[in-house]
Image (spheres, rainbow, N blue to C red):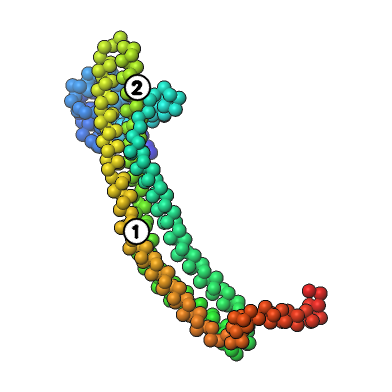
Amino acid sequence: MSWAPKPSEEQRQRLDAQPNALVAAAEPSIPQSLNKQSTTTNPAAVSARAPNSTWINLYYKLDTNDKSSIKSASTMSWAGFKKNVNRAATQVMVKTGHVEQTHDRSYEVEERRYRVMENAATRLQKESKGYLDSLRAMTASQMRIAETIDAFYGDAGANDGVSRSYKQAVEDLDAETIKALDGPFRSTVLDPINRFCAYFPDINECIKKRNHKLLDYDRVRAQVKRLTEKPDKDVTKLPRTEKEAEMTRAAYEQLNEQLFNDLPQLIELRVPYLDPSFEALVKIQLRFCAEAYSRMAQVQQYLDPDTRDQYANGNLDARVEQVLQEIRELSIAGTV
């Protein structure tokens, strides 16, 4: 960012001699949205300022990059900083018992209910995405297993077709079923949950603003109490503080009432909103399981019928032990 060069002493004297015309000429170039700190463009009002102040303001206005916007932003930032400091001090005084804290038990119950729902919805959003990722990971693992088994069986698997059939079933499950379910799952389950959770940041911002207004009200209310118990020398200070307390109380109660009325409605709407997504989730899971069962059932016909019977009768362990014994009898495996 480049700033306008500083005028020379001669230029400064010439500008100080005619500040009104130059200020009036420079004033229209200032964006109104950035110049909220000044509410008048009257040259007479500008000339009434101190010379140094006039020169500084004029230097801001003559800047090619409109330095007045930075000045205005810094003023607003300072005001926000002061509010944050006051609220932090009020929180400390509330904890130490120097300021009485206002409690609305009915609202606090609704906020706790909202927090429970927010945590549950956020967890649902995370797990829903994890479910889709898990399906992809599972079919990818099945494909790697199928490729390894096919290579392990070799010609023996090619003769009876069992390894090739399993590999083909897994490939079809990944290529057709998973990819066919991806779009519907996103549109009927994941996207609606994401949209529901997208409201939480705005709601949390309203709750945060409500809490800030409550701190402001408690702070000013405590000031009114102190001035009532120990009057100030300035007799107008108490009425001003009471007026400020009334304004902060109205701002707090407006937000408090709005949240108290809206939070229960939001909580009640969670069920009718998520009902269609829940139904879609069940149907998607049913379709995936049915497709997987159907494809694996086709592979089963290639398996040895005796193996299935031995497994059903509990004799498969004896057969496996017999094969292991034959392996032990080999000279290269005799030490196992």
User: Helix, strand or loop at disc 2?
Assistant: helix
- Quadrant assignment for the N terminus: top left
> Looking at the image, which is closer to me, 81 or 296?
296
What's the residue type where badge 1 is placed?
Answer: Leu
Give the residue at the far front of this rendering. 313
> Looking at the image, which is closer to me, 66 or 290?
290
Residue under label 1: 274
Is 322 situated above or below 85?
Answer: below
**Which residue is rendered at x = 79% and y = 81% of the image?**
329
- Is any part of residue 158 visible from this angle? no
**Which residue is rendered at x = 22% and y = 23% of the image?**
46
What's the residue type where badge 2 is placed?
Answer: Ala
Give the residue at the far top of this rendering. 233
Using a 10 Å C-alpha cutoff, classify the residue at mark 2 as few (fewer than 14 neighbours), some (14 to 19) or many (20 or more): some
Using a 10 Å C-alpha cutoff, classify the residue at mark 1 as few (fewer than 14 neighbours), some (14 to 19) or many (20 or more): some
Q: Position of residue 185 (x, y in %)?
A: 39, 66
Based on the displayed image, in which of its 4 quarters is residue 38 positioned?
top left
**Which residue is rendered at x = 51% and y = 67% of the image?**
137
Q: Position of residue 236 (x, y in %)?
A: 25, 14
**Which residue is rendered at x = 41% and y = 56% of the image?**
125
Residue under label 2: 222
How far apart in space, not on screen, are marks 2 and 1 (Cα)? 46 Å
Give the residue at the far bottom of this rendering. 159
Is 235 situated above or below 244?
Answer: above
Q: Position of residue 322 (x, y in %)?
A: 72, 82
